[in-house]
């Protein structure tokens, strides 16, 4: 993974200067000078920071960062008094700051080496992606049963006592007997595709509260464990 990521950083940064210079020259605009070096430096740092993260935490794509790095020559052209170009409505909405239409639509626009490095990174990312789930519980017996069901269905599962900020899962499972259940449900309601809470069948108030906090399902333990595998559907 590290070699794939570094190859992508190197290829994108190497493609930056010639890509910008070709577009500036072909449009007949004045040189943007030091802005290219500033863009290269920013791009190298931003890409390195992004690609050092696990795939699941990479919220942006390398191409998005390359597109954002166009702000440096864009600002230089603004300072030089160059008039913005006319763009179609779709492009203007997608990239409102790209006033001179510098941002590449595809990594293929960056040359063969950059395109192949981007493609290799995409293959590595696709190979690493598995449906993910998180269980908030301290019950070791429950943990073992749920982990077995999740793994059998092809899921990667994290077991935590507290939901980490800035993490994402397809499924969030919360034991209502856990002291932090309410906070976990509240956090997972914004970071998991589906939140399922389970607890003692006599605690109707806890299940009603779970639903009010954002749980999609809140049910007695007996029902939850009756068909455990059903909570881990294959994702499309």
Image: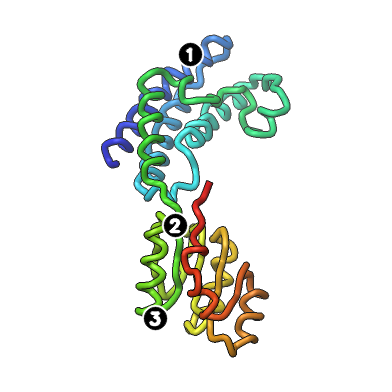
Label 3 and label 2: CA atoms lie apart by 20 Å
The answer to whether marks 1 and 2 mark residues whose Cβ atoms lie closer than 8 Å is: no
Residue at position x 47%, y 27% from top? 35
Lower position in the chain sequence, tag 1 or tag 2? 1
The residue indicated by pointer 3 is: 139
Residue 62 at what x, y percent from top left?
A: 45, 36
Say whether residue 17 is left or right of residue 203.
Answer: left
Label 1's element? helix
Label 1 and label 2: CA atoms lie apart by 43 Å
* Quadrant housing residue 98: top right
The residue indicated by pointer 1 is: 22
How packed is label 2: few (under 14 Cα within 10 Å), some, or many (20 or more)? many
Q: Which image quarter holds the N terminus?
A: top left
Q: Nearer the viewer, mark 1 or mark 3?
A: 3
The residue indicated by pointer 2 is: 132
How packed is label 3: few (under 14 Cα within 10 Å), some, or many (20 or more)? few
Residue 49 at what x, y percent from top left?
A: 38, 45
**Considering depth in this image, is 137 or 50 the residue closer to the camera?**
137
Say whether residue 176 is left or right of residue 216.
Answer: left
Residue at position x 49%, y 60% from top? 232
Lower position in the chain sequence, tag 1 or tag 3? 1
Label 3's element? loop
């Amino acid at each position: 993974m590290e070699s794939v990521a570094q190859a992508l950083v190197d290829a994108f940064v190497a493609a930056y200067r010639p890509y910008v210079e070709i577009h500036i020259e072909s449009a007949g605009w004045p040189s943007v000078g030091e802005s290219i070096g500033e863009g290269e430096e920013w791009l190298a740092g931003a890409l390195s920071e992004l690609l050092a993260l696990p795939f699941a935490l990479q919220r942006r794509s390398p191409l998005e960062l390359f597109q954002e790095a166009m702000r440096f020559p864009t600002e230089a052209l603004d300072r030089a008094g160059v008039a913005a170009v006319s763009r179609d409505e779709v492009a203007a909405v997608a990239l409102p700051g790209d006033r001179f239409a510098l941002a590449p639509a595809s990594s293929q626009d960056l040359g063969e080496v950059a395109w192949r490095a981007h493609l290799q990174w995409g293959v590595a990312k696709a190979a690493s992606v598995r449906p993910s789930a998180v269980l908030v519980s301290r019950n070791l017996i429950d943990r073992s049963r749920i982990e077995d069901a999740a793994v059998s269905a092809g899921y990667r599962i994290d077991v935590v006592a507290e939901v980490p900020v800035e993490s994402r899962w397809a499924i969030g499972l919360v034991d209502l007997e856990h002291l932090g259940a309410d906070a976990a449900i509240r956090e997972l309601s914004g970071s998991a595709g589906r939140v399922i809470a389970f607890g003692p069948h006599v605690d109707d108030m806890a299940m009603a509260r779970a639903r009010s906090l954002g749980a999609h399902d809140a049910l007695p333990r007996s029902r939850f464990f009756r068909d455990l595998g059903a909570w881990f559907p294959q994702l499309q």
